[in-house]
Structure formats: C-alpha cells, structure tokens
Amino acid sequence: MSGYSDFFTEEEHKAISTAIRSAEKRTSGEIRVHLEDQCDHLPEDRAAYVFDKLEMHRTKDRNAVLFYLAVDDHRFAVVGDSGINDRVGGAFWKSLCLGMEARFRQGEFLIGLTEGIQKVGEHLSQQFPYHGEDVNELDDEVSTGLL
C-alpha cells in the first residue's frame, strides 16, 4: 500500500488540476478531487462527508462535483450538489462511474480520473454554462488526507 501521498506524481497532480481548470472554463460549475488512503464507509457516504467538510455546498448555484478516491481500498465515488442533482439523472452518474471504473481496472488511474473530469465539465457546460461574471469558487488543486 503506497497511500495517497505518492499515488499520483507531482506532474500527475498538475495534470489533474489542469483538467479541472479546463473543464471549468466552459461552466460555472466547480470540480474538486480528494484523495485518501482508506474508506471505512460506503464511498458515496464518505464522499458526501468530505464534500461537506470542503464546504463545496457553498457555491452560488450549488453546482459543485467531488471526485473522491480511497486509493489503498480501490474505492471511489463521484457526488454532485443539489443544483446538479436536480438537473442530472442517475444514469449520467452511473455511466460516468462505469467509464472511470473500466480505466481504473486497467491501472489507468490518471486517464480515468481526467476523462471523468472532462465528462463532468461537458455535462455541466450544458446545465450551467460559463458566463462572464463567473469566479472560481473552489480550489482546483487536489486535496488529500483525512478531514
């Protein structure tokens, strides 16, 4: 078990942040990634807890998405705030996670994550298009560790 601290290289962390910034250029939505070593709960429950601790629910349009990965346990979840969930059906989230899981099973963690971020950005751009007054409400850097 290597843990979140060296799961992605520094260059890969930069690639994730770049993917987030690229996705957010087309939408007023906000995207974050959080890594932990282990998840002792359902990953969706833990992701909801982390979402709250990162205060992602405080975005103006309630349109934030969290990609949560427990790297040692090989578990992950993607959760969106109420503004997104009111507009996006469960089929979207399921399809997104299945695509990511297929990449993860091949050991393509960076590709799976960045493709997931890109797909969320595309979908958010339809529901929450970018507008000139948009400000970056959440940090684009990968957050790590227990919260």
Image: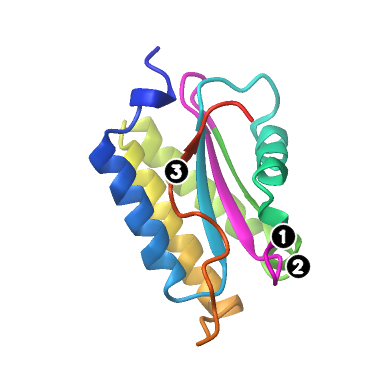
Given the image, on which type of amino acid does mark 3 rest? Val
Snapshot quadrant of residue 28: bottom right
Q: Nearer the viewer, mark 2 or mark 1?
A: 1
The mark found on residue 142 in the picture is 3
Q: Nearer the viewer, residue 76 or 37?
A: 37
- Placement of the N terminus among the 4 image quadrants: top left
Q: CA distance from mark 3 to mark 1?
A: 18 Å
* Relative to 53, 105 lies left or right: left
In this picture, which residue range is highlighted in magenta?
58-75
Residue drawn at 70 percent across, 71 percent down: 61
Element marked by disc 2: loop
Snapshot quadrant of residue 60: bottom right
Is residue 117 positioned above or below 123 on the image?
A: above
Q: CA distance from mark 3 to mark 2?
A: 26 Å
Reading the chain from its start, which is encountered first: label 2 or label 1?
Answer: 1
Q: Position of residue 46 (x, y in %)?
A: 68, 33
Q: Which residue is mark 2?
A: 86
* Relative to 120, 20 lies left or right: left
Q: Residues within 10 Å of mark 1 (few under 14, many from 20)?
A: some
Given the image, on which type of amino acid does mark 1 rest? Arg
Please say if the residues under marks 3 and 1 sit with CB atoms less than 8 Å apart. Answer: no
Q: Residue furthest top?
A: 1
Element marked by disc 3: loop
